[in-house]
Amino acid sequence: MVAETKLYDALSVSPTATQDEIKKAYRKAALKHHPDKNKDNPSAGEKFKEVSQAYEILSDPEKRKVYDQYGLEFLLRGGAEAPPPGAGGPGGMPSGFGGMPGGFGGMPGIGGGGTRSFHFSTGGPGGGSGGFSFSNPESIFADFFKQGGAGMGDDDDVFAQFTGGGGGGGRSSFRDSPSDRRRRRAPTPEVTTVEKPLPLTLEELFKGTHKKMKIKRKTYDDGSGKRKMEDKILDMDIKPGYKAGTKIKFKGVGDQEEGGTQDLHFIVQEKPHSIYKREDDNLRMYVELDLKEALTGWTRTIPTIDGKKFTLSKAGPTGPGYTETYPHQGMPNSKKPNERGDMIVEVKVKFPTSLTLAQKTHLKEIL
């Protein structure tokens, strides 16, 4: 049983709502009533302030517990003593709730009027001057989305629609209180991009393939807020003709950080091949001849990347560096799959490391 339900009513949730349900309710209400989307509706600004202030208390387990037990007025007085019976309405609720300037508290329209600034405190009689004060609604809104919101995946795009986004550039529809400026957080760090190698064989890059990659990522538990590890399976299609250095990008699938969720980029790497060396869309292979073959003639069977075979013969002599080109037998073009590069066969001649005097004499006679 809770002392009052007005903050829950502001978000249209029940007092038994989970943190995840409170987050989702705030997200929906804040986007609906944000002043930048309701420039011709002044009351929307007050509603936006109310739902933001309700979320600020209900999303904090300690403040929510005190609110459930004693009501909002007890929180605003500093939490030092129980509210007197009937003060400010049922359950200790200040009479300013319901569209009066200032939302729930900390602005004109609370109880007997005037301006009050409060601080939440668990000790010290009378609450004193160091009490709870509501944050700027725009700051609450900005922090909510920068910390991942309700995990909807499009928070960056949604937040970018609002020019008053609390933590940085742009115009804000609300002024910061002095205490809010004192408590302003440091700029939220940008979400990082993590790059990982993706080694592939030349055959996989020739034909194209489908890969499933299992990764481990750090996230926050919605209920407890603690860090946890979870497995995620990523599916990726490798198009025929991809080159080394090609990036396969996944947005928001990495570790969850303060500024959001990391992006993950897989960078294609070509595994060394036993026969071919890739040169853009061309494939180069080498035929090694001994000196006798180079001088008198030779025959070789030449395999292609797609399994065909060609017979290459030369009567000789064949010099080092001689090349033979087979058009359209190389790698496909990833942007034009029907086009292929060439296969180039290059000759290397293996010279003897030593000759006898008789061999040298005989060569001089015949050359």
Image (tube, rainbow, N blue to C red):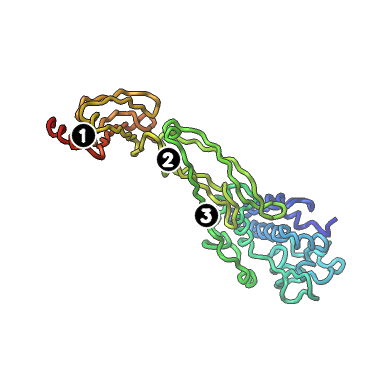
Return the disc, 3 or 1, that comes first in the chain's sequence. Answer: 3
**Residue 158 can be seen in this image:** yes
Above or below, 148 against 341 in this view is below
Mark 2 or 3, nearer chain start: 3
Quadrant (top left/top right/bottom left/bottom right) for the C terminus: top left
Q: Secondary structure at mark 2?
A: strand
Q: Is residue 251 left or right of residue 102?
A: left
Quarter of the figure with residue 364: top left
Q: Is residue 352 above or below residue 251?
A: above
Q: Which residue is mark 3?
A: 192
Q: Residue at x 63, y 44 (%)?
A: 231
Amino acid type at circle 3 is: Thr
- Viewer-closest of 114 and 51: 51
Q: Is 292 positioned to the left or the right of 170 in the image? A: left
Residue 291 versus residue 174: which sits nearer the camera?
A: 291
Q: Quadrant of residue 67?
A: bottom right
Visible in this render: residue 344? no
Label pair 3/1, CB-CB below 8 angstroms: no
Closer to the camera: disc 3 or disc 1?
A: 1
The quarter in which the N terminus is drawn is bottom right
Residue designated by label 2: 270
Residue contact between numbered discs 2 and 1, judged by CB atoms under 8 Å = no
Q: Position of residue 195 (x, y in %)?
A: 49, 49
> In front: mark 2 or mark 3?
2
Which of marks 1 and 2 precedes in the sequence?
2
Q: Which mark is residue 319?
A: 1
- How far, Cα to Cα, is label 2 from label 1? 31 Å
Q: Is residue 5 above or below residue 120?
A: above
Tell me the SS state at disc 1.
loop
**Category of crowding for the residue at label 1, using alpha-carbon neighbours closer than 10 angstroms: few (below 14), some (14–19), many (at least 20):** some
Residue type indicated by callout 2: Glu
Badge 3 marks a residue whose secondary structure is: loop
